[in-house]
Amino acid sequence: MRIIKFRGKSLNTKMWVYGDLNHRGKRTFIEYEVDCKTIGQFIGKTDKEGTEIYEHDIISVNGKYPKLVKYIDEYACFCLANISDLNKEWMNPWQQISPDWWNDFKREIRVIGNAFDNPELMKEGVNHEYAI
């Protein structure tokens, strides 16, 4: 069974809160009102340490190759982009996560941060092996 849940940063506490997504007019809630820019869905996978992976997380593969996780509407699925490819205008950096790729690397994947709490990880040249 697929688990559908979300997280977002509380507008009041600035802490991450988890739960179901609820829209009321122009306001967005996950039990608490959250900053809608920070909302991310659980992708249904965990890293090698058992940490749940959410949209906007940054993962590394074997301490290298940092990737941003994001849902891409045109592919209708969660995708990965190498951080180093995000600002290249001549290419689409987003790649679908194939079951074969996941099975090959699932024991090497680690959540090292996210785009909101760790914006420095979105820069090229950062040592991602020891992040977080």
Image (tube, rainbow, N blue to C red):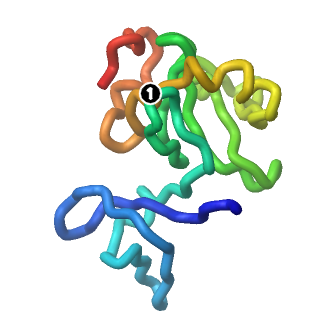
Question: Residue 92, relative to residue 108: is it above or below?
Answer: below
Query: Which amino acid type is shown beneath numbered disc 1?
Result: Met
Q: Which residue is drawn at 68% across and 60% down?
A: 2
Q: Is residue 41 left or right of residue 131?
A: right
Q: Which residue corresponds to mark 1?
A: 122
Residue 83 shows in the view: no
Q: Position of residue 95 (x, y in %)?
A: 76, 32
Residue farthest along the bottom direction in this orientation: 25
Instruction: Classify 10 Å Cα crowding around label 1: few (below 14), some (14-19), many (20 and above).
Output: many
Q: Residue at x 55, y 24 (%)?
A: 109
Q: Residue at x 82, y 27 (%)?
A: 100
Q: Where is residue 103 in the image (x, y as percent from the top left)?
A: 73, 26
Question: Residue 50, relative to residue 38: is it above or below?
Answer: above
Helix, strand or loop at disc 1? helix
Q: Which of 63 and 14 is in front in this view?
A: 63
Q: Position of residue 86 (x, y in %)?
A: 60, 28
Q: In this view, does 7 lie to the left or right of 132?
A: right
Q: In this view, does 29 lie to the left or right of 102?
A: left
Residue 96 shows in the view: yes
Q: Position of residue 58 (x, y in %)?
A: 48, 32
